[in-house]
Amino acid sequence: MKIRSRLIHLILFTFLLLGTRVGNAQSDERPTERKIDSAMAISPEYMPVTVARLQGFQFNPLVYKSIDTTFFYTSEYDPLNRTEGIYQTLGIYSQAHRSMVFDFEREPGFSMITLPYPLYFKTENDLPYYDVKGSFTDISAAFGLTTEQRIHAIHAQKIRRFEFNAQLEGYNNSGYFLRQGCNLFDLNAVIHYSTPKNIYGFICSYIINHAKFQENGGLEDYDLFIGRHFSDEDLTTDLMTFSVLFGNALSTINTHNAQWQQYVNIKDKNNRYFGTLTHTFQFKTLKSVFEDTHLNNDYYQNIYYINTDSTRDTVNYYSIVNSLQWSNYEPLSRQSDQNYFFRIAGGIRHEYVHAKMPFYIGNNYTLFARTNIRLFSVWDLFGSIAYSFNNYNRGDAIAHLGATFSISRKLQHYIGLNADFYRTSPDFFYTYYIGNNNLWYLSWPKENTMKLGAYWTIFGYKLGFNYFMLNHHLYLNEHRTPTMAEKGIHVVQFNLFAPFRVKNFSVDANMALQHSTSPVVALPLFAGKLRAAWHFRIFKNRLRVQLGTDLMYNTLYYADAYTPVLHQYYHQENVKVGNYLFWDLDLTLQVSRLSFFVRGNNLLEGLIGYKYFTTPFYPMQSRRVAIGINWKFYD
């Protein structure tokens, strides 16, 4: 045990030392190399394709970023691998997950339920929009030995006045434990058209998310799993021998999102511009089904409201949204580099919701406005407000304020402040729900959340501070029923993200220190991820080779557990997770735009014990190998 303890402390010391080096290394990178691509130091073969994120009906000028053509990130083939996010998960890719780094964000309008799949279930705010001269295609596939497959494809095309892009992602995994498999499919597409003089245009998008999960509910005997010894061959090689909570449960989730946004630029005969009128229509639907047979009475505690033999719980609703607004900038406009400007937008949004289970029919109206002002070429001021009327969301109010001071735009050097205020009705799921084993009909005051933040950024390095104050905070307690926190909760947080590049060596570090005054907002004191890589060329510079490593670590804490019956995380104070170092290695080969990688995951399994959990009762993947290929090309 002493050898294992020394090993983990040595690796942790290296992890923190690299993070400290990253935080002070921006002077090693020449500014001109970052002007085009954040990874230009290892990306001499630059591909001139940029991408921005669409923003639904609350559109703002787009901020484009260059497509990274390096192979530094190739082995981060799944979004959970990426350094930018630190998540607790259910052990395999594409299943439920939530961030270990606290944040709060809410859109205006009605919300039935917040599903824990933010990286996989796309919404209108996640849609990419590519700026291409001809076409751009990105195809990749990955295979985790022995059961995991993932495919990913993007195509963007411009033909005359039409711009089109589509993205396809698919995941399939039979899992490593009993009843752990998942199958997920996501497809989204965007079409933009504008008339020759850009008087009229439209943006049409469609998103489908389809997922099937075999829900095992986690391990029944946590102590048996973590108490293994590497000499116990049956327990270390055949994970199917461990008992799970649900042996027959299955979840199916389908969402559809269609949006049509059309705009008219108002101009007179002299081509003077008087703003843009925009109409947005959106149709959304969600249906989730949880099924179980041969029910586990120990878990359900013999509580059955409908059937004692089987369970079939559903959430099923659709919504129709129309919004009309005026702005003095048009959709898909770029962020301006002018020294002075004044932008404003405002309008009204109507939403009709029809829910079959749980039952709800209602109309909601929201007035909204936003502005962006640049003063003296260095100050950027932001503001937005939304207020809702009628039915369940009556009296909801959301406001955002921000100010950024530009020290040097050329060096991407900024300091900024922001403040967000929310007074919102909780997800309707917390108010009314009926299922075979869960039933409640409750009334809650509005949740009040305030976020105050400050940040400093240069060349992609970002140091931030956030303070959250939560009043009337709702959560699921250990009995999986909604509960309101008895008093206000305060969260203090420091974040550092540092992308360091020098010659052939590259590092991305993401670290967070945070503290919550209440255990019901469960957070690790420290959570961090680090990716480092070294690359070189062989065979007369025709073959590029990269050796990379990933580290992830968080301190011990009572992480929220997960219940597949409700598709939600819930509070518990019985099992702590953390204090385990996840260490991965990868080798990537690249010829032109074609990359091939081999990645080894959780290489310290057994050497430092078997407490590799980020969510209680759901072990992470054991030591394994994944291979993959990625191909980018364009005309």
Image (tube, rainbow, N blue to C red):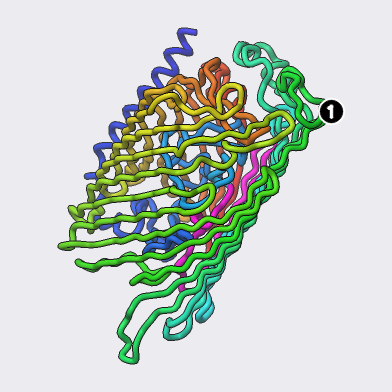
Residue 342 vertical placement versus 256 (above, below)? below
Position of 501 with respect to 323 (left or right) is left
372 is higher (above) or lower (below) than 329: above
**Residue, far top:** 2
Q: Residue at x 67, y 45 (%)?
A: 359
Q: Is residue 183 visible?
A: no
Q: Quadrant of residue 569?
A: top right
State the image coordinates of residue 224 (x, y, percent, origin top left).
65, 12
Does residue 127 belong to the magenta stretch? yes
Q: Residues within 10 Å of mark 1 (few under 14, many from 20)?
A: few
Does residue 517 sit above or below 266 in this rendering? above
The one of 26 and 409 positioned closer to us in this rendering: 409
Residue located at (60% from left, 27% from top): 481
Q: x and y percent of residue 328 in the render?
A: 33, 72
- Residue 450, placed above or below residue 270: above
Q: Main secondary structure of the magenta part?
A: strand
Instruction: Say whether residue 304 is magenta.
Output: no
Q: Residue at (67%, 18%) from the top-left corner? A: 236
